[in-house]
Amino acid sequence: MNRTLILLALLASPVFAAAPDGADLYNKYCQSCHGADRLGGMGPALLPESLVRLKRPAAVKAITEGLPATQMPGYAEVMNKDEIAALAAWIYTPPTTPPKWEMADMKASQIIHKEAQNLPAKPVFKADPTNITLVVEHGDHSMTVLDGDVMEPIHRFQTRYALHGGPKFTQDGRFVFWATRDGWITKFDLWNLKVVAEIRAGLNTRNVAVSSDGKQVLVANYLPHNLVRLSTDDLSPQQIIPVLGHNGKTSRVSSVYDARPRQSFVAALKDIPEVWEIPYAGPNAFQPRKVVLKDYLDDFYFDQTYRYLLGASRSSPKGQVVDLDTGTKTAELDLPGMPHVGSGITFDYQGRRVMASPNLQDGEVTVIGLDDFKTIKHIKTLGPGFFLRSHENTPYAWADVFSGPEKDAMHVIDKRTLEIVSTLRPVPGKTSTHVEYDRYGKYALVSIWEHDGALIVYDAQSLKEIKRLPMKRPVGKYNVWNKTRLSEGTSH
Ligand code: HEC
């Protein structure tokens, strides 16, 4: 650019024109639904952390035209293009002071549903309660309760906006807990099909874990930078654990899991090279043990003993194996690209325990030996994948192709040969993803990830389609038995 052009550009820039003010427009038109300080209200929070999945042009479109079949109105008649652009820019701008969410805010948000207290410990339905599958539908923010024996819905209800991370069950399968993107935690009584309690435990939340003794819920937050412990009784807040690293930096929490054999929670941190273990029994209960690492570990997989964490590594192409007992890195993991280890599975192959992981960047499923952490095979697929799933009772593992032109493909891999034996295209042109099984490994359920999508039920043995259930963008499925019995074919 020459000088004249720079000058012209400056004159045309909002610095010189009376630029529309995003903050003012927000307070005038949006605050009533999206809340003071953009923290959310009847509508979702509009902070940069909340909008990571929404591209800026899509936000402009939503503000201009509204969102069909929701309460979100369109503003094409009210504001001009510049005003809408200023507003869109504003919602992607971090607040000048980081928003706070403290004990008092949590307590004030808690809702205890009276009609759902002290109900009988007996299912109100005939279906086998251990073979229920929950289907999370993002399209219209609902949840379907499926009878896993016959694959028929027995209940469907509205959830809060945008569930994030998987629902977690108590060991008996009666209660289930989940988080929303905006930090709302729900306790649901699956036997009585009722919401028991709700609380807002954060402003931007990743997931929850439930302790194996059924007493604690731990919430992993991006905003504020903390973990929050709730009682499983009525979700009353017990403790805020601020996440401050050895280097003086605070961090977002990527995820938290229950490590049953260790009687502890383990949390992955996004911004500091540490892993935190928070015991829920013993003399050090609820005091985080901070394992300092040389590299970040924000996505990991436990080995079957829960002693080793297998994780991706940000700075080197190799993954890392962390020994939780000694708190040290014990091996490098031979996983290229960007493995999605959190979605890996384990099984026996030629007398050895192996782990298979999809890859978010390369079209391959990588199989490594869990004894020496060396690669046994790179199984080439038609594109990057997100989920890999199997079940003890089936010789097959299903791997999706999550992005690229082949996103409608679903590979079936034979665990005995590590070969792809079939590639299905459930609905040509539509994203098919996330397989989950029923309790017995008899059916494989595939999601068609579209607003007017479906759940396709396959016979897991013959790979023949059995039926299609229409669903609104079914993002995830969770079988009570497989999730509470730590099935080797799924994540927990
Ligand atoms: C009458 C209530 C209401 C008002 C007023 C309102 N919104 Fe919304 N907005 C909603 C609801 C409800 C949703 C969620 C819709 C859904 O279920 O997908 C939403 C969604 C959005 C989304 C998409 C969020 C996401 O995560 O995908 C954006 C962006 C948005 N609103 C911006 C605005 C802006 C900017 C204004 C002011 C000009 C505004 N809204 C005014 C209720 C409202």
Image (spheres, helix red, strand yellow):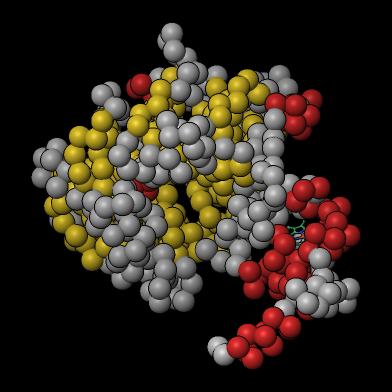
Q: Quadrant of residue 57?
A: bottom right
Residue 346's place in the image compared with 91, above or below, is above
- Residue found 80% across the figure and 59% down from its top: 23
Which quadrant, please, contains the N terminus?
Answer: bottom right
| 427 over 257 or under it: above or below | below
Asked whether residue 172 is in view, the answer is no
Q: Quadrant of residue 89?
A: bottom right
In the image, ligand 1 is in what quadrant? bottom right
Q: Horizontal placement of 310 versus 1: left or right?
A: left
Residue 265 horizontal/vertical position (percent): 44, 27
Give the farthest residue toward the front.
3
Q: Residue at x 49, y 37 (%)?
A: 249
The quadrant of the rendering that contains the C terminus is: top left
| Front one among 152 and 178 | 178
- 301 and 447: which is toward the camera: 301
Q: Residue at x 33, y 69 (%)?
A: 383
Residue 6 visible in rendering: yes
459 relative to 127, above or below: below
Where is residue 323 shown, x and y percent of the image?
26, 30
The percent coordinates of residue 128 (x first, y second) are 51, 34
Left or right for 247, reference 305: right
